[in-house]
Amino acid sequence: MISLLLWLLSLTAPKAEVYRDGKEFTVIASVDIERCSSEVWPLLWEFKHIKEYVDNLKSIDSLGGGDNWYSVRYIGDFPFLHAEVTNYKWIVEEGVKIGASTTKYIIESPLPIKFESSKCLWRLESLAPDLTRVHFCSNVVVDAGGFEGIYTAIAKTDGKRILRNFARYCEGY
């Protein structure tokens, strides 16, 4: 009975993998959420919700936007670094895909980590009337200064934690 329960929990647990090719790190993650995609979409798109599931953000401020894009500034404390990041987000396909690109990094860290660029894509996949899979893919170019193993572990752990938080937020909203 316990093994059946653990198996069922594993079906909805966030999945995340990190791949590295030189200075490029790719995070591929997903989570299943017990809500229809039309309920998940606004919680993923509207920046006012981000602080509810990215728990290490101190603040998020709008820098402007339009019908299908916006720019925001995040300030937060992450493992081994303090970050002030400006992000540009746009709708790739209404109700389905969101793109994002980091346009400015200010990083303070005791580690010699230097971020160069970041692009990501969020995609919603309707699995059933009340079940949506959220896919996340991020490509980050970073000089990890010999700390690639630590950066990889942090990226994988953070990816799972943020998606778990997002699923809980959606399901409780």
Image (tube, rainbow, N blue to C red):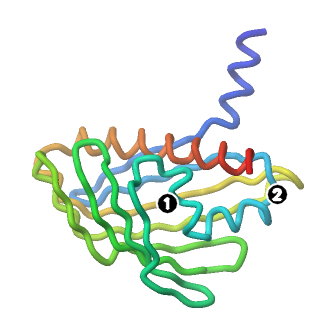
Give the class, few, some or many, for how many residues have Cα within 10 Å of label 2's Cα (few <14, many ≥20): some
Residue 124 sits in quarter = bottom right
**Could you tell whether 123 is left or right of 121 in the image?**
right
Q: Nearer the viewer, residue 119 or 35?
A: 35
**Could you tell whether 48 is left or right of 22 in the image?**
right
Q: Residue at x 34, y 61 (%)?
A: 75
Mark 1 highlights which residue?
137
Q: Residue at x 70, y 46 (%)?
A: 32
Q: Secondary structure at mark 2?
A: loop
Residue 94 sits in quarter = bottom right
Q: Residue at x 16, y 43 (%)?
A: 147
Of the 4 image quadrants, the one containing the N terminus is: top right
Pinpoint residue 57: horizontal percent, then vertical percent.
41, 54
Answer above or below: position of 45 versus 162.
Answer: below
Q: How many marks?
A: 2
- The label on residue 36 is 2
**Could you tell whether 137 is left or right of 146 in the image?**
right
* Amino acid marked by disc 2: Cys
